[in-house]
Amino acid sequence: MAVDVLGDRRVDAPRRAPRGPVLIAGVALGATPPADLDAELDGLAGLAVNFDDAETPESGDDPRWHVDHGRALVGREAPGPPEPGGPWERACVVLRDYQFTAPGRLRGIFRPGDPLLGRNMLLEGRFGPMRFHLGVRVTGVEDAERDGQRVWGWTYETLQGHLEEGRLTYEVVKDLASGDVEFVIRAFSRRAPVPNPILRLGFAVFGRAVQEEFYHHAGQRVRELAGVPGRVPVVETGPDGVTVAPAGSGPSWTDRLAVLVRYPGASRGL
């Protein structure tokens, strides 16, 4: 199933209090200053993964979860190992630097100098005037040749306070026999408990559609950036070592009017 036509495959610690806008009932007006993003990243270290690994889906039709698997053709190379500077290597850079999201929907804030495995990332989800701060942690890195394919990718899991519970894997895969290079997403997810009734209703109504839109755009974005030489953005890192991705998705004037919600999800008694 192609990422750009991916449908619903559901067959079916305390943390450091970040500085910034004053929260009223978990909500604040205004964007988070860059210095506060740095502090908020530090605070993610005190958050645990928000689901029990023993509850992960047993099959693709586990009714407790949305289980998704999508792929998009990025480009073609000659058969054999990845070509230097070719589509496979370019797509790996796009994934490594988190350049495949839609800036109007999702930003990733992280320290590229940190090791990829174990890296904490602050995701800023955007929906209308709302800004949601959500934490994830990279819990797996794949860099291997397997079953006639060259594979590189990474996996993150959702942390306490996230709107969802689950695990998402991004991979760049080259078929060594055909030369086809694909972007692959594998994921399972479900809604986390959300105490706020308005946010809970909104996520129940729009959450899955936004998730599928993300999958669709990610496949297109990787193909657009990695399929042609010279399109992969250069990552800019601030003096504090923090990067906001994708490139060009820094603060805008509309952020000053945004409603900021930090970590709206609750844990299931972990």
Image (cartoon, rainbow, N blue to C red):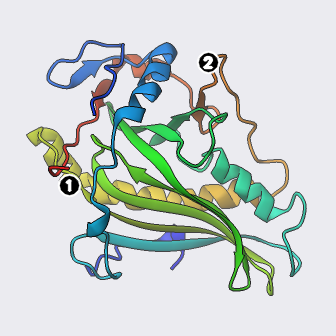
Q: Are marks 2 and 1 in contact (CB under 8 Å)?
A: no
- Residue at 49% across, 39% down: 120
Rendered location of residue 76, percent (x, y):
80, 74
Q: Quadrant of residue 80?
A: bottom right
From the viewer's perspective, is 6 left or right of 79?
left
- Residue at 66% across, 49% down: 96
Q: Which of marks 2 and 1 is nearer the N terminus?
A: 1
Disc assigned to residue 240: 2
Give the Cα separation between the discs numbered 2 and 1.
Answer: 38 Å
Image vertical order of residue 115 relative to residue 186, above or below: above
Q: For this rendering, which residue is in front, 115 or 28?
A: 115
Residue 104 visible from this viewpoint: no
Give, as a three-letter code, the residue at label 2.
Asp
Q: For this rendering, which residue is in front, 269 or 8?
A: 269
Rendered location of residue 36, percent (x, y):
44, 16
Image vertical order of residue 176 relative to residue 151, above or below: below
Disc assigned to residue 205: 1
From the viewer's perspective, is 208 left or right of 34?
left
Residue at disc 1, secondary structure? helix
Residue at disc 2, secondary structure? loop
Give, as a three-letter code, the residue at label 1.
Val
Rendered location of residue 100, percent (x, y):
60, 50
Please tell me how crowded label 1 is: few (under 14), some (14-19), or many (20+) other residues with Cα within 10 Å. few
- Residue at 78% across, 48% down: 231
Q: In which quarter of the image is residue 194?
A: top left
- Residue at 27% across, 46% down: 163
Rendered location of residue 234, percent (x, y):
76, 37
Residue 209 visible from this viewpoint: yes
From the viewer's perspective, is 48 left or right of 269?
right
Image vertical order of residue 195 relative to residue 167, above or below: above
Q: For this rendering, which residue is in front, 73 or 81?
A: 81
